[in-house]
């Protein structure tokens, strides 16, 4: 039979790479995506493949997962084949879009590299994200190995188009997503496309000759019928999935199934686990079988539609089934998998005892000895019905020891800096580097940032100009990760973290509580300066929240450290990445030449809100930076939101040396890629004009100092470099015109 099968070749790849490989062979029409660990690699690999000319998928980088889901829905509304990949909080951010996709019956495929949902923040693998999707109307496949990731992705699109429902292909983050194994793939891409079949979808909302309304407003009883039809489609999937799996087995010689089992035929005790833990559990079963214990293990390859009957058949001889969940449905007495298996067995009239254990949260490794202990618990008649496996008892008398003494308001005072207001402008005096040396650092040197990283440099420069009490909020990013590794912190002042998309709103809520509690006499009088630090592309996904804060005028300072990419996930393109720059999602190749659009002008966007103070700063001009920080504090105290943007070096991803970063930042200022200016109550003024000082340089000099953009100095990219120069000149000339006009 094997001789009649299409040729396959052997690869040594990870689950993420296999998902990308299947997508490349399918050659989807569109992928809307946003990078989030540990699924990011899928988009990175596909982008490299596109640069190499191996597919023609239209890859659209969104500014957040919610928009990525919207891109996918819009593409599927046009009847095309659509692909996405995400994880963790990114999946939850997109969650409200999932029922729209299924409720309007638009097929697509989304890979989920399962990861812990914060908080607290963790990027390691468990299933706490995936279980939120159980009620969204999506078919859910679960792959236990990189090979299954490939196979499931090929079957997923065929299933989706057969029953007109979207499909999730889930697998363990960092275990399956990143661990490489030997895998077989079809040597000829056409084999995959022929198996899936030609696109038979209608044109959807693109059919102007037969216009339809997609996603109309609907009341009962029509909505009830709509959901009933979705139910029928899921039941149709229950019948179609085994058929498609059988067809695929005939083609590939590999079998996929809704439930896989190992040595369960006569098992008295059965362990049920999802994903990569299944392979470990099989080894534990063999060991206990050698000891004469009749044990077995099952795993699920399909979560929706739930294969309850198949599970019941496999467990019919078991006296105890222990379900190990990598997530908890808090307060329900078990994770979602254990609750559903318990219900499935009850429906068959089974009296099998079901034990639930929560294990492996936050990516905790699962070893053979762990599976042995779980199976042996099945033979203990006194074993609790529900418990956490591997949790340790905390110290009831624990009292945290502060790493740093709190900074008093007197210590942070700096009488040399004064702010005076006159004729609609604030003048700062005494804001030089020397006069601020005595001010204690709120961000201690004990952090884990890379050598040459601009984040601590810029944060400390800002804080040199800020006197008095400070509360800091960092949104997710490198700055947060390298300073707050539990149980330590590098901050000497109060600190809070929230996600990319919601930092400014979170700080706004804290400010309101501060005001309310002061007004009610619940805390002492005094002033606190609230500062949000945002970067690593946070002003893409977090722009809406920041604009809302600016429009409300919440009294805070927003510091954007612009390092020109999503550095915390391994440097994917951000909207602030320079045009033409190479990144993990803007490769160089025969078909691609780096990032395809201009960098975002965030200060002008913030200024358009009418906020009282907007400024740009640079570590190469430290006195200017400190003065603007002091001015921002004045405006935050008296008028509302203040915003400062600084260019922040990242040697690791910029492709330069830590020792040269100050020169690189200085070149960005002198070529006017990052001009220094202020917008004070709507009036623009230049802080520094390199033309007048005779230091103006071409933008190519700046680009040539970094490995990510050095290729743009080659003759073959003259046209791209000239476009960048023209755009930088246009923005600079506009700034000069604004600065010369008394009302602008």
Image (cartoon, rainbow, N blue to C red):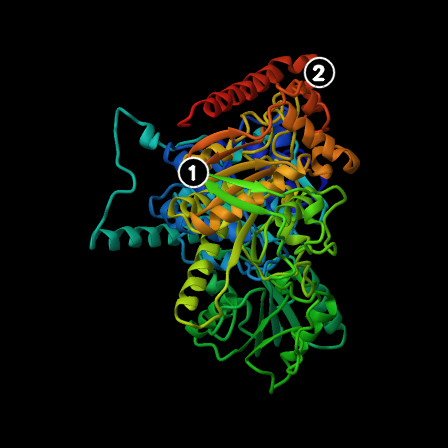
Say if residue 19 shows up in the picture: no
Q: Position of residue 400 (x, y in %)?
A: 66, 73
Q: Which residue is mark 2?
A: 714
The front one of 397 and 314 is 397
SS for tag 1? loop
Residue positioned 20% across, 55% down in the render: 221
> Image quadrant for the N terminus?
top right
Earlier residue among tags 1 and 2: 1
Task: Count every numbered label the image shows and give the total.
Answer: 2
Check residue 125 in the rendering and tell me which mark sits there, or answer none. none
Q: Position of residue 88 (x, y in %)?
A: 54, 53
The front one of 171 and 194 is 171
Say if residue 475 shows up in the picture: yes
Q: Indicate left or right for 98 with 500 as reference.
A: left
Q: Position of residue 37 (x, y in %)?
A: 61, 48
The front one of 574 and 161 is 574
Residue positioned 54% across, 52% down in the render: 531
Q: Position of residue 532 (x, y in %)?
A: 54, 50
Q: In this rendering, is residue 714 above or below 570?
A: above
Q: Indicate left or right for 324 with 438 as reference.
A: left
Check residue 424 in the rendering and tell me which mark sits there, or answer none. 1
CA separation in Å, label 1 and label 2: 48 Å
Residue positioned 43% across, 54% down in the render: 238
> Image quadrant for the C terminus?
top left
**Mark 1 and mark 2 residues within 8 Å of each other at the beta carbon:** no
């Amino acid at each position: 039979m094997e001789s009649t099968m299409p040729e396959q070749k052997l690869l040594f790849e990870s689950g993420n790479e296999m998902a990308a490989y299947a997508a490349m062979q399918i050659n989807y029409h569109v992928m809307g995506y946003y990078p989030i660990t540990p699924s990011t690699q899928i988009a990175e690999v596909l982008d490299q493949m596109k640069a190499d000319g191996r597919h023609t998928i239209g890859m659209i980088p969104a500014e957040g997962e919610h928009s990525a889901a919207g891109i996918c829905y819009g593409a599927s509304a046009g009847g095309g084949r659509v692909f996405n990949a995400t994880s963790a909080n990114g999946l939850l951010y997109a969650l409200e879009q999932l029922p729209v996709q299924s409720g309007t019956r638009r097929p697509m495929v989304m890979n989920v590299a399962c990861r812990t949902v914060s908080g607290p923040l963790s990027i390691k693998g468990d299933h706490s994200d995936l279980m939120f999707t159980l009620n969204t109307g999506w078919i859910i496949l679960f792959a236990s190995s990189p090979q299954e990731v490939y196979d499931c992705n090929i079957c997923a699109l065929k299933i989706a188009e057969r029953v007109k429902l979207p499909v999730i292909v889930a697998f363990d983050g960092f275990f399956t997503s990143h661990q490489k194994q030997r895998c077989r793939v079809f040597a000829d891409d056409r084999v995959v496309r022929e198996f899936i079949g030609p696109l038979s979808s209608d044109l959807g909302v693109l059919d102007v000759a037969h216009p339809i309304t997609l996603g109309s407003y609907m009341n009962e009883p029509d909505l009830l019928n709509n959901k009933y039809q979705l139910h029928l489609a899921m039941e149709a999937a229950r019948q179609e999935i085994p058929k498609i799996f059988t067809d695929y087995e005939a083609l590939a010689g590999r079998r996929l199934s809704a439930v896989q089992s190992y040595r369960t035929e006569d098992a008295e005790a059965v362990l049920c686990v999802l994903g990569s833990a299944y392979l470990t559990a099989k080894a534990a079963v063999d060991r206990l079988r050698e000891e004469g214990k009749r044990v077995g293990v099952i795993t699920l390859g399909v979560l929706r539609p739930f294969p309850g009957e198949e599970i019941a058949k496999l467990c019919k001889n078991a006296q105890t089934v222990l379900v190990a969940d990598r997530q908890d449905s808090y307060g329900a007495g078990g994770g979602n998998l254990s609750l559903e298996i318990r219900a499935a067995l009850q429906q068959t009239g089974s009296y099998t005892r079901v034990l639930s254990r929560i294990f492996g949260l936050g990516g905790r490794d699962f070893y053979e000895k762990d599976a042995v202990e779980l199976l042996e618990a099945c033979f203990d008649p006194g074993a609790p019905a529900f418990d956490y496996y591997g949790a340790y008892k905390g110290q009831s008398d624990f009292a945290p020891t502060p790493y740093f003494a709190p900074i008093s308001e007197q210590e942070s005072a700096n009488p040399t800096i004064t702010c005076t207001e006159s004729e609609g402008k604030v003048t700062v005096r005494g804001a030089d580097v020397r006069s601020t040396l005595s001010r204690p650092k709120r961000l201690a040197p004990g952090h884990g940032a890379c050598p040459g990283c601009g984040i601590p440099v810029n944060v400390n420069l800002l804080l040199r100009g800020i006197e008095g009490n400070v509360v800091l909020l960092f949104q997710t990013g490198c700055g947060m990760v390298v300073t707050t590794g539990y149980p330590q912190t590098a901050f000497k002042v109060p600190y809070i973290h929230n996600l990319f998309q919601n930092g400014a709103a979170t700080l706004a809520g804290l400010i309101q509580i501060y005001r309310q509690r002061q007004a009610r006499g619940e805390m002492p009088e005094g002033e606190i300066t609230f500062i949000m630090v945002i970067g690593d592309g946070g002003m893409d996904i977090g722009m809406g929240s920041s604009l809302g804060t600016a429009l409300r005028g919440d009294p805070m300072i927003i510091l954007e450290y612009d390092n020109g990419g999503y550095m915390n996930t391994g440097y994917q393109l951000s909207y602030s990445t320079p045009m033409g720059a190479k990144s993990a999602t803007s490769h160089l190749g025969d078909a691609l030449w780096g990032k395809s659009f201009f960098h975002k002008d965030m200060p002008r966007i913030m200024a358009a809100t009418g906020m009282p103070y907007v400024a740009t700063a640079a570590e190469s001009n430290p006195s200017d930076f400190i003065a603007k920080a002091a001015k921002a504090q004045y405006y935050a105290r008296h008028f509302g939101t203040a915003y400062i943007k600084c260019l922040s070096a990242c040697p690791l991803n910029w492709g330069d040396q830590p020792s040269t970063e100050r020169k690189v930042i200085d070149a960005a200022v002198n070529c006017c890629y990052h001009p220094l200016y202020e917008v004070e109550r709507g009036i623009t003024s230049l802080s520094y004009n390199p033309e007048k000082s005779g230091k103006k340089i071409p933008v190519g000099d700046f680009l040539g100092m970094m490995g990510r953009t050095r290729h743009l100095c080659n003759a073959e990219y003259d046209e791209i470099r000239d476009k960048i120069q023209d755009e930088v000149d246009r923005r600079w000339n506009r700034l000069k015109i604004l600065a010369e006009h008394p009302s602008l």
